[in-house]
Image (tube, rainbow, N blue to C red):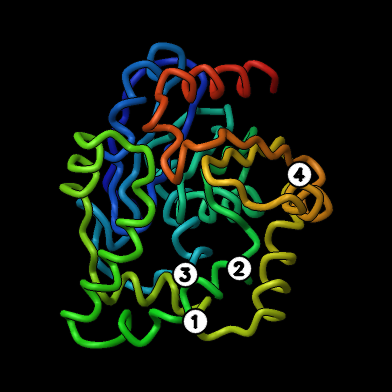
Amino acid sequence: MELSFERVGSGDPVVLVHGITERGESWRPVVAPLAEHHELLIVDLRGHGSSAVEGPYDPLTMAADVHDTVVATQFGGATAPVVIGHSLGGIIVTVYATGFDTRGVINVDQSLHLAAFKDALTPIEPMVRGDDASFQQAIDMVFSMMNGPLPADEVERVLSLRRPDQAVVSGVWGTVFDSTVDELDAQVGTLAGNVRVPYLALHGDDPGPDYATWLAALVPTAVVEVWPEHGHYPHLVDPARFVERVDAFIAAL
């Protein structure tokens, strides 16, 4: 599927992939400064923003959509893009790197240790899969906890962009709900274990003291960087620092 997208800037090609229930516009505070040195392809994932609402919503399909859009737009020409994803987008760009050409990956605040994610989601599974009121309550609970140090105006902006579709959210989280911890570990190992390009895991919430070692065993090219007290949206809490870090990552490729 070709996705709805925005294309802006010039230079090294960079694809930006947003988180669940959001859209490409979520990246707005970093778009102009990144576009000074990079050409950006900012997509709306299927079921999000202006893209088609059509399942399935698994990471493999969604990563293939991103690639379809890169190909359809001839984005980057002969130069493979760097792919940057936040939250769900971090999973998508990781999967992208296992099957499609990319120069590097930046995963913004999405742990690949999905067993821990399953532990966090399991208590609200009945609400996510319940009636509309229960679903909306679950979404409000999850995302209110993720605002962290985001300024109030940014909280309102991100909230205004959010489109929580129950079928989409249930489809994205369905694998986590329906798989055992061992199955999740095996799936992540199969996919992420094939990443061979430079991989930056940038976290505003500390993924834990053992995470860097765990991830390096899975993705030998991975570097884990934690920005303490930046929360789930480090790129929006400190856009200037994020742009500088992206520039440095790409310059080192």
Q: Nearer the viewer, residue 228 or 133?
A: 228
Q: Which residue is mark 1?
A: 177
For marks 3 and 2 on the same chain, the one whose residue lies earlier in the sequence: 3
Q: From mark 2 to mark 4, how far is it between C-alphas? A: 25 Å
For marks 2 and 4 on the same chain, the one whose residue lies earlier in the sequence: 2
- 184 left or right of 26? right
Q: Residue furthest top?
A: 36
Q: From mark 2 to mark 1, how far is it between C-alphas? A: 12 Å
Q: Residue at x 50, y 71 (%)?
A: 120
Mark 2: few, some, or many residues within 10 Å (few <14, many ≥20)? few
Foreground mark, 3 or 2, reads: 2
Asked if the residue at tag 3 contacts the one at tag 4, i.e. Cβ–Cβ closer than 8 Å, the answer is no
Q: Residue at x 42, y 22 (%)?
A: 39
Q: Amino acid at mark 1?
A: Phe
Q: Which residue is mark 2?
A: 116
Mark 4: few, some, or many residues within 10 Å (few <14, many ≥20)? some
Mark 3: few, some, or many residues within 10 Å (few <14, many ≥20)? some
For marks 1 and 3 on the same chain, the one whose residue lies earlier in the sequence: 3
The spot of residue 103 in percent (x, y) is 64, 33
Q: From mark 3 to mark 2, how far is it between C-alphas? A: 19 Å
For marks 2 and 1 on the same chain, the one whose residue lies earlier in the sequence: 2
Residue 151 position by quadrant: top left
Q: Which residue is mark 4?
A: 196
Q: Secondary structure at mark 3?
A: loop
Q: Amino acid at mark 4?
A: Arg
